[in-house]
Image (cartoon, rainbow, N blue to C red):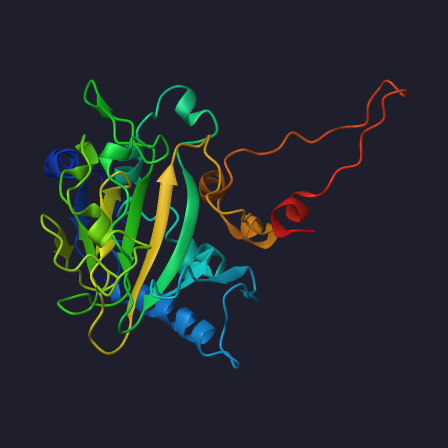
Amino acid sequence: MTESNSKSSVVCMPTEEEVFYFDLNGFIVLKGALSDRHIEDCNAIIDKFLNVDPPLRHGEWIGAVHAHTYSGTEGFNLQQIYEAGEPFERLIDHPSWIEKIKHFVGGQVGFDVKHGPLFIDENFASIRGPGDAIGIHSGGHKRTKRTQFRQFNGQFFCGQVDLLIALSDIGPGDGGTMIVPGSHKSNFEHPDLRKYSMGRDGDKLPGADGMPGAQEIFLDAGDVLVFVDALMHGSATRINEGERRICVFRYGASWGNFRHPYYPSDELLERLTQTQKQIVLPQQPIRRTPNRISDYPDPPHATDQDLYRGG
């Protein structure tokens, strides 16, 4: 899709079809959500990060972006990717999906939006090469509050809705995301979950390849997979040469907290629009002012950045 015919400036509301299938299956796919130019700009920044010499290692920072891995077979992550520049900042509230995300997270009236409509608790770019994958995890049977799926009186109240943005074409052999449709409503553990779960031992491929009932999602660069985190999900193992590149943004209610102990930089907050800032950091701290009662001075305290950056 070219910049001129992209939907980048059109606010896309959820359709009746999307609502039906999100409720039924736990996921939908948004075709052509990003323009070719936007994808190129994101990939150019990732290229720059991956080509530093010596290469980035787990735990290192490049600006306010954090290099991160789990066990090694899940690939390489760039956490806090919205810190990487304007193309990633635009993903925070992109018109192709932001109203859909609000609808599926729900709670847009009342206490759930006391601090704003949404909150991003984690955002990262994932790069996987041959042999990389992640096993199946989550599922409605776990009843995890943070990732729950709930629908009541025609409204969604989902604890976490994930946005997976394809920055490369993902077809057969590329290690596509695998999901078990409808598993966000399951009451029982999948009979083969332990054979295909992340972190398992054994000689099987690290992903969910061959798992009964699982569906691999193929995407073109610029497509977006939207799913409730209660849905059982993982990936197939990449067997092709080259890289699978995606971005993941995880949205929930504005009263939530960060999954990892990151904190947006002051520089990022200064660059963002007020709407974006409210999604990135909905809960603004109440600053202490000099106390009028002199016998009760303000206690010493660490700065916000010290708390989140180990200072």
Q: Residue at x 26, y 55 (%)?
A: 135
Query: Can residue 7 be seen at all in this image of the molecule?
Result: no
Task: Residue 232: give x, y in percent of width and height.
Answer: 22, 44
Q: Residue at x 24, y 51 (%)?
A: 136
Q: Against 166, is 252 above or below?
A: above
Q: Name the quarter where the N terminus is drawn.
A: bottom left
Q: Residue at x 80, y 31 (%)?
A: 299
Task: Residue 310: give x, y in percent of width and height.
Answer: 65, 51
Outermost residue to the front = 202
Q: Nearer the viewer, residue 276 or 230?
A: 230
Q: Residue at x 30, y 48 (%)?
A: 163
Task: Residue 118: give x, y in percent of width and height.
Answer: 40, 35
Outermost residue to the right = 295
Corner quadrant of residue 124 = bottom left
Residue 244 as seen in the image, left or right of residue 60: left
Query: Can residue 210 be seen at all in this image of the molecule?
Result: yes
Q: Nearer the viewer, residue 252 or 76?
A: 76
Q: Against 208, is 138 above or below?
A: above
Task: Residue 269: give x, y in percent of width and height.
Answer: 55, 48
Residue 12 as seen in the image, left or right of residue 274: left
Q: Nearer the viewer, residue 200 or 301?
A: 200
Q: Against 157, is 201 above or below?
A: below
